[in-house]
Image (cartoon, grey):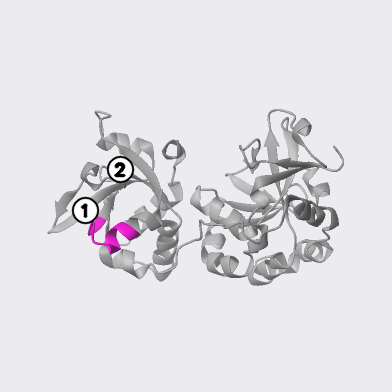
Amino acid sequence: MRKYFVNHDNLRRHLQEFESMGEDVSDETLTMLMGELQHSCLIIAGNVSTLHQMVVFDHDGRRMGLLFTDMDEFRKFDRTGECPSEACDFEVYKTMVESGDLDGFVINPQSEGFIIIREIFESIRHLPQHDYPSEGAYTSFELKGLRDSMDNAELEDFLNDSSNIGRYEELFARISDSTLLTLMVSRQDLSEFAEDGIINMEDEPMGFLYLDDIGGKYATVYTSEGKISNVTTDLNKYSQIVNFSQLTNYALNDGLDGIIINPNAENVMISRDVLLEYWPVLEEFCNDQKLNTAIKHMFLIKEEA
């Protein structure tokens, strides 16, 4: 279940930093904290579909619910194991407060005890996209055609120029004009499921996203299948075209430390803090709606086909 994988070390770090500053909270700290909240998937004490099962308490005349950054924090509260729990994206809790069901929430009551009142929810106006409709998106064969014809020479030239380090607006502009791949892996050889080199994952997720685990957990993207060959793993490798905005939201929502472009080659790292700072730009310019079906298809890597 999703709640057992929820972990928000980055959110907790910003919560603690916020509390330590007292009344001298910097704009940067506040911005990062709000960004972490926007992209969070927190565990609630209760069941959101049946309000009478939710844990609600009074705090200064306000009806407050309880949220947790991970199941360890939830178990500190629910020592008997009798309280229901559920993991939901932040927008669910924002809706609950704005609809009048609650006046706010307390995060990790046994640890940080951070209070989010109605005014904070109302101040957060833009939330990351989680719905990616497939209407009008590319077919599997059109996606394969994109993979077969991709040419990211201009982006690679940009990545190889050390003077471009830190020029994120230009980088994301170039990404918006590029076709990028991510690496999917599987413990079993899935080639028998391929049709014309395409593995359809409509029915079940037969592969999972490869994460670089050096100095943190990073999603990875590649400018060609040749760059994927630089990755060493005992698992079976497959390529997948990626909607970069969608991958960014996934990385932030699942607590990853960032994204690496072409690991073991150009090795361009985009940290979590940078993704948080630029995610509205990424969602506006790097969200190609026609790529919404890409996550449902993998390809046999041409050199292995």
Q: Position of residue 197 (x, y in %)?
A: 81, 42
Q: Position of residue 128 (x, y in %)?
A: 49, 61
**In magenta stretch: residue 197:** no
Residue 22 visible at all: no
Tell which residue pokes out farthest to the left in this image: 61
Q: Quadrant of residue 27?
A: bottom left
Given residues 4 and 139, the one toward you in this image is 139
Closest to the camera, between mark 1 and mark 2, is 2
Residue lying at 32% horizontally and 62% vertically, measured from the top left: 21
Looking at the image, residue 193 sits to the left or right of residue 244; the answer is right
Residue lying at 74% horizontally and 50% vertically, measured from the top left: 140
Q: Quadrant of residue 69?
A: top left
Q: Quadrant of residue 116?
A: bottom left
Residue lying at 17% horizontally and 49% vertically, measured from the top left: 57
Looking at the image, residue 299 sits to the left or right of residue 42; the answer is right
SS type, badge 2: loop
Question: Where residue 18 is drawn, which disc sits there?
Answer: none
Which portion, as a residue range, is magenta?
95-104
SS type, badge 1: strand
Q: Position of residue 289 (x, y in %)?
A: 63, 63
Amino acid beneath label 2: Asn
Instruction: Determine which residue is flagged by label 2.
Output: 47
Amino acid beneath label 1: Met
Quadrant housing the N terminus: top left
Instruction: Determine which residue is flagged by label 1.
Output: 64
Residue 61 visible at all: yes
Residue lying at 70% horizontally and 64% vertically, measured from the top left: 175
Given residues 102 and 263, the one toward you in this image is 102
**In magenta stretch: residue 103:** yes
**Quick one: label 1 or label 2, which is nearer the N terminus?**
2
Looking at the image, residue 138 sits to the left or right of residue 81; the answer is right
